[in-house]
Amino acid sequence: MRTTIRAALLCAGLVSMPALAAPAVLWEKVWSYDHAAGNAAGQKAEIPAYDPLNDTLWVAGVAGVDVLNARTGALIRHIDLSALGDVNSVAIRNGVAAVAIAAPDHTQPGVVQLFNSNTFAAAERIQVGALPDMVTFTPDGSRLLVANEGERAVMTDPSSTDPAGSVSVIDMSSRTVVATAGFAGVAGSDSVRLFPGKTAAVDLEPEYIAVSPDGSKAYVSLQEANAVGILDLATNTFTEVKSLGTKDYSLPGQGIDPSDKDGSVAVRTVPVKGMYMPDTIATYVAGGQTYLVTANEGDTRDEDVRIKDKSVQLDPSIFPDAAELKKDENIGRLTISPFDGLNANGEHEALYSYGSRSFSIRDANGDLVFDSGDDFERLLGERFPDIFDDGRSDNKGPEPEGLALMDVGGRMLAFIGFERTLEKLATAVIAIYDITDPLQSSFLDFIVSPGDLAPEGLVAFSRDGGYFLAVSSEGSDTTSLFRINLVPEPGGVALVLTALGLLGVIRRKR
């Protein structure tokens, strides 16, 4: 019987295929909650976390946390934390909710406030580093990791107070900080992008943390440095800081729309390199290997300049057409780094812009295995030109920021939220990719959600056999829940039916 089936599959041309054709994705909005209408002064919508024990969503939003019924979207409780500072992040594991709160003076130590996620009772309050921007549990829930960004007091003033960035490691059995991992002397830390006159210990600013599925390592995005730090969770120390390199926009399939003054969505190749600079990152396992997924938003400390600025001098041996390039309709308005890519004469021999307008997949060593290329701008411009924000083309484009991964019926899906779409239409966009095979990742669809704007945080979860994505959008101060389903592509179904039909023919001949 096994030989007969194989013969049928061979006739249908299926045996050589590792899997059926990529599936189609179906999505629908289940509910949406307006946090601004919840009568809690200053409450925003930024980072959601799902509590499976109580089927609730906790949404961190500056003034406090809104706890929502995950089935209906109804507000269960608002927890006011405004007296402590700005609420930046929330994570939940084993009935414990951890909320990261920056001090009113962001250069001073912040805190993590723990809660019982069932009763909402406040528990321990734990002091951590300056500007705790993100918090996450290890897979077994034994430790809590806090990204202390340590931003300087005044972005435009390098001499202002600049606390060291770090990661706090909290032991959940004792509920105390057992280690604070910094960057002084870490391998590779002095060879990544640092601001002039700054050391790695002070300049590196942890943005987001993703823990490997086996709990052995944590990957920490260092956005402004265009790097990732690798934290060994056996020793609670950083072992390496890895530069993420750059993306060459002059290559086919890697272009961008570089101008807000060209009158259209015009994705094209240009002589510029993009620094990936991811915000949200996540990990997953494929083929027994750990992979890192990054949403490559890009960020500045307000140091950026335009290519057309008089201060930007282009090396004539590399850019003989500098005058043409500096025109508004070309790349003149594109914002770049003023100090990266300079030669000994202070001329730009390379142009480096912020973010890569894409998402990427890297192996456990940080080496690139997949990038979405020009998909985001090109596909959005083709399918939804009315909500493409061409006014951001000269900056960082759609700014992919939020990211969530979820296994849906045996396929690993990545959801990437765009912070920038046309504001006046108030419509959020989330790209969906099948990343089951990292090297063959493919675009599936866009979630397009009127009434939501600027997705900041995404969390994916399954419940009762269903698959869901919760999205908190800071532009609209809304949290929306989407149901996600996969269906085989018609071509894949046809191939299966063909195989079964051929099997029937073979069996009849016997």
Image (spheres, helix red, strand yellow):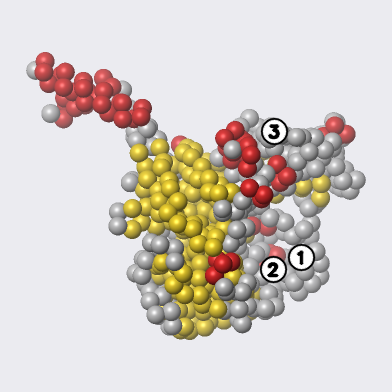
Q: Amino acid at mark 2?
A: Glu
Q: Nearer the viewer, residue 482 or 416?
A: 482
Q: Nearer the viewer, residue 302 or 217?
A: 302
Q: Would you say 368 lies left or right of 165 here?
A: left
Q: Which residue corresponds to mark 1?
A: 155
**Dots 2, 1 in contact, CB < 8 A:** yes
Percent coordinates x, y for residue 421 in the rendering: 63, 47
Q: Nearer the viewer, residue 508 or 448?
A: 448
Q: Amino acid at mark 1?
A: Met
Q: Which residue corresponds to mark 2?
A: 151
Judged from the image, the secondary structure of the residue bearing numbered disc 3 is loop
Q: Would you say 143 lies left or right of 278 here?
A: left
Q: Is residue 460 above or below residue 397?
A: below
Judged from the image, the secondary structure of the residue bearing numbered disc 2 is loop
Q: Nearer the viewer, mark 1 or mark 3?
A: 3
Disc nearer the start of the sequence (3/2): 2
Residue found at x 38% / y 37%: 23
Q: Nearer the viewer, residue 416 or 215?
A: 416
Q: Is residue 507 above or below residue 341?
A: above
Structural crowding at the residue carrying mark 3, measured as other residues with C-alpha within 10 Å and reported as few (<14), some (14–19) or many (≥20): some
Residue found at x 12% / y 28%: 1
Q: CA distance from mark 3 to mark 2?
A: 35 Å
Percent coordinates x, y for residue 337 in the rendering: 77, 50
Please, which residue is most extreme toward the right here?
310
Q: Is residue 503 above or below residue 482?
A: above
Q: Which corner quadrant holds the C terminus?
A: top left
Structural crowding at the residue carrying mark 2, measured as other residues with C-alpha within 10 Å and reported as few (<14), some (14–19) or many (≥20): many
Q: Which residue corresponds to mark 3?
A: 266
Q: Amino acid at mark 3?
A: Ala
